[in-house]
Amino acid sequence: MKFILKTTIKILIFSVLFIIPIGLFITFFSLSGRNIPIWNIGIRNILLFSQNYSLLIIFISYLISTLLIISLTNKQKVRSILMLHIPALIAGSILVGGIYLTRYRHYPLSLGEKNVQLDHRAFLRENVFNDVSGKLILIKKSENNYYTLYIYDRTKNDLVIANNVGIGTGKKNFISISQNNRRLNFTYERNKKSESLIIPYKKFTVKNDLINNRLINRYTVQIRKLTISLSNYFMNLDQTDKYIFLGTLFISVLMISIPLTYALNDGGWGFSGIIGVILLLVLLPFFYGAVFKILQRFRFGMSFLGRYSYLSSPLILCFCGFFIDLLVKIRRREKKI
């Protein structure tokens, strides 16, 4: 009983501690995927945008915390895998209960569609030449909150100078930002004709070797594919059934990852256990993606579940976790012999 209580408290404490780093990690990757310049939009926008992923952030923090605590558990003191499932489920139930009780209240991590508030300074520095898409762009502030716009095309050796440039549409000369199309539009009058220069977000972003790493890109692409596969399963479900589906799916993740983490734990310094956690977090999206791809191809379903037949895939994954649990137990008994 003491072990269950201590482990539950540890999982909850680590879950809270991991919320900020995990939240920043997920938010940064989401913003970089939209080609928004991360370092120019301000911490307020980053926190605002992170609210869109608050549930995901909480549950990933909880999953990582659970696996790390298990990876550091002394296998000589805790021999039962069931004992490891109990504190994980208790901690998860407390988090779910807290989310449910506060669902109608507005907190910093409340759910909702929050958009990043962008202005031209997120993409262009004022009073200096910005090298973008083969052009040099300079904006200088003038009177009455207007700007003077300079666009020099190096390939054509052509210079455009536009005065009284406003931010937003509705003027002869303006700079507008389209979040839907992810691009900037420079419209100016030249030789009594209206001309436009359209530049997408991605031309303004600075390449980051960490984010643009090939392995990380492969991992994020797999997560996107898995998200699409999952959405095909519960897109037409009502809100309650969606939560049931995702909850059962998350339980399957615990049932698969907990026994594997326990099996990879060497019971010593816990180094191999931590490496095992990292390995599991890397491989889980690929495993789940392969399972859902196979199930979609064969259109497998459990008809006896009735209206809950959409739970067929998560329940199969739960059975996989139970099977892995059984294999680990059998393996331990063979070692004792």
Image (spheres, grey):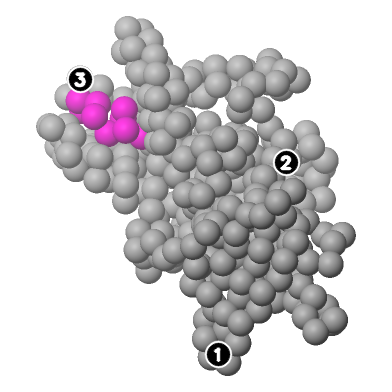
Magenta segment, prevailing SS (helix, strand or loop) = helix
| CA gap, disc 1 and disc 2 | 44 Å
Residue 33 covered by magenta stretch: no
Residue 51 location, quadrant: top right
Residue 275 location, quadrant: top left
Helix, strand, or loop for circle 2?
loop
Tell me the kind of residue under disc 1: Asn
Q: Which residue is mark 1?
A: 157
Residue extent of the magenta highlight: 66-75
- Residue at the image position 33 percent from the left and 12 percent from the top: 6
In this rendered view, identify the residue nearer to me: 274 or 167.
167
Q: Which residue is mark 3?
A: 77
Q: Where does residue 218 sit, x and y in percent of width and height?
A: 44, 66
* Residue depth check, mark 1 versus mark 2: number of the one nearer the observer: 1
Tell me the kind of residue under disc 3: Lys
Give the mark, 1 or 2, whose residue is nearer the N terminus. Answer: 2
Give the mark, 1 or 3, whose residue is nearer the N terminus. Answer: 3
